[in-house]
Image: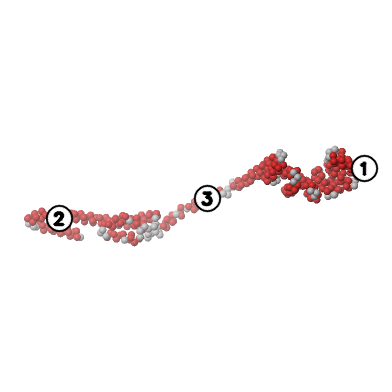
Amino acid sequence: MSLINQMLRDLESRNTSNNTPPTLQRNVQVTQPLPSKKSFLIWSLLTIIVTGGTYSAYQYIKTLTKTPPVIIADNIKKDPVPIAPYETVLAAPNAVTDPMPKIELQPSKNTTLQLVSVAQPAPTVLPAPTIQQKPPVQTVPATQTAPEIVAEPVIKKTPITSKPALIESTSAKQQADLLYHQAENNSEDFSVTYKLEQALKLDPRHLKARLLLAKTLHHQGQVDKTAEFLDQSLVLFPDNLQFINTRAQLYLQQKKPSGALETLQRIGLVNSSNETYLSLLAATYQQLQSFDKAAKVYQKLVNVNPDKAENWLGLALSQEKLGNPKLTREAYQQALNKNTLKESIATYIKQRLTELR
């Protein structure tokens, strides 16, 4: 209003100057008129600029206070933490009433502060949709539908575990056979024993390796070790005749006829034609001084193999113990006629024949 009043005063001063005498007008025109017009124009331009600037600043701030919610919502999704206190932002709208143009710089510089801080009343509303948007992603069902749990109990794994066992067992048997054949063709006792023991570690039920090892230990004179090994073998093969005969023979060598008889009676072969078994049984009865049973067994041996001089010698000794001189002489003579006995035994038979006449 002060600017308008000043303009009116200037107009009135012009009118009064026009009514003055010509001399005064000339004086006024020389000194005052030109400066007054310039100042008037300058002041009018300044008023227009100031008025337009304040109006544009008011409109700019008004638009800022209306538009921020959309922008703030986007910014809160990125960083919901307020940067400036809420009281400083509430004081910003009052800057419109302040005639100072410096306030125009505050909205432009602190736009981020105003945008973030205005969103503080609504942080509780905006985070909620963000929390609701994450579950629909359904990351958990995606992992549940795509797990490869079915591949673990696949049937392919069961044959894989069983096949290696079969392969290992067959390879162990093959290795045991190889070691057995190497020991069979080897003449060194120590090497034979070692290879046979290794073969039995690979295949404990390798019968040929067990028989050869028992024979090798027996030939080496390791009676105790052989007896222990045969006892272990009879646990695995209780009806094996070869193990039974060898174990009974060891008992007879150790002068243990009762053990030999118990071992031989594991199987009922009294009426069989196995010459080795019958000869061991007859020798066992002789050590037990059961000459009657021994004579019967030797008679079976003579019937099985009449060409063997040892069978006739055993029969002669049993009949002599029983007091049958006639049967004794006949048996001694049959044994001497075979010409297969040692010289010392043949000499003994001749002596007995001369004494029994």
Q: Which residue is drawn at 85% across and 44% down?
A: 314
Image height of 19 relative to 321, above or below: below
Instruction: Name which residue type carries label 2.
Output: Ser
Q: Position of residue 11 (x, y in %)?
A: 14, 57
In the image, 159: left or right of 224?
left
The mark that comes first in sequence, 1 or 2, is 2
Marked residue nearer the N-terminal end (2 or 3): 2
Total marks in image: 3
Q: Which of marks 1 and 3 is in front?
A: 1
Q: Which residue: 75% across, 43% down? A: 219
What is the three-letter code of the residue carrying label 3? Pro
- Residue of label 3: 147
Visible in this render: residue 131?
Answer: yes
Q: Is mark 2 on a helix, strand or loop?
A: helix
Q: In which quarter of the image is residue 86?
A: bottom left
Percent position of residue 98, x then y: 27, 60
Mark 1 vs mark 3, CA separation in Å:
104 Å
Q: Residue 36 carries which label?
A: 2
Residue at the location (16% across, 53% down)?
Answer: 38
Determine whether 216 is above or below 2 in the image: above
Looking at the rendered image, the disc whose residue lies closer to the viewer, 1 or 2, is 1
